[in-house]
Amino acid sequence: MSETNKLDGRRALITGASRGIGAAIALAFADEGCDVAFCHLGDGEKAAEVKRAIEDKGRKSYAAECDVANEVALPVMVSRARKALGGIDILVNNAGHSVETPFENVSVAAWDRMIAVHLRGTFLASRACYGAVCESGWGRIINVASQHALKGTLDKAHYCAANAGIIGFTKALAREGATKGVLVNAIAPGPVETDLFRELSEEWRDAKLAELPLGRFAAASEIAPTAVMLASSDGAYYVGQTLSPNGGDVMA
């Protein structure tokens, strides 16, 4: 691979990449020479924009609507993405959603959906892609979690639990994947200015801003370089790690 394009010849599948962090990672991967497939849920217009942007960079792209928690639909989407790109070397599990709810008001349905989108979706996509990323003896799985999994937060017990599960899953799968040449790591971003984040209450956002040493929220483009590093040869000695670009919200 060339020095300028860290992902030349690679093929990535990213879940939940029609906007926000997922879209930023998709575009950053394309800038580095990677073909990119991605899925979304009910966001066709934005997905079409991201797909065009990837193709405008001279890369192949494939986009499809898919609920990552659907164990029937997700493998079909993966199979079609693999065919469209000619293979999958990199999987980024990014799909997620966030709802602020005091613990006493969290319903079983809300709990189950949060776990389904984050943890079940990460498992299902990883299972569907594992054979493909193991195929050549070189592969990457990058799981996007949250810094809330590391510290907890008010009104998000179900969100914190789901993302903590992703980190545990990352560590376990990393031990198995490394023996097959597949490096599995996680990214736990801090607060990022995305559509999802802007849906949170102004009160919650103001309280979070006051906690940050940098005094600002991140742009999605500031998270994407971490994914590029983990997906490229620069990340060749990272196994089972959780990297947290969070503006000082969590200090390890």
Image: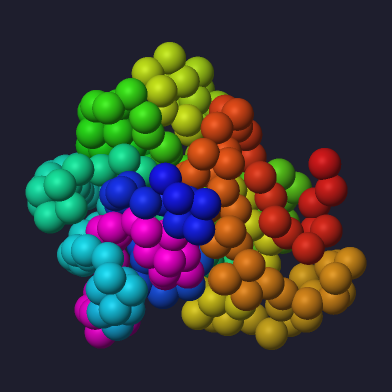
Could you say which is closer to the camera, residue 111 or residue 3?
A: 3
Left or right of 81: which side holds 168? right
Based on the picture, tell me whether residue 63 belongs to the magenta stretch.
Answer: no
Left or right of 131: which side holds 27? right
Screen quadrant of the C terminus: top right
Q: Which residues are magenta?
A: 22-48
Residue 3 seen in this snapshot: yes
Image colouring? rainbow
Q: Residue at x 85, y 76 (%)?
A: 215
Q: Residue at x 43, y 14 (%)?
A: 179
Could you say which is closer to the camera, residue 200 or residue 81?
A: 81
Screen quadrant of the N terminus: top left
Q: Residue at x 34, y 56 (%)?
A: 34
Q: Residue at x 64, y 57 (%)?
A: 189
Based on the picture, tell me whether residue 37 belongs to the magenta stretch.
Answer: yes
Left or right of 14: which side holds 239? right
Left or right of 131: which side holds 26? right
Whether residue 170 is situated above or below residue 86 in the rendered picture: above
Q: Hey, which quadrant is residue 23 in on the image?
A: bottom left
What percent of the width, then of the height, locates residue 242? 63, 40
Could you say which is closer to the camera, residue 241 or residue 164?
A: 241
Q: How many marks?
A: 0
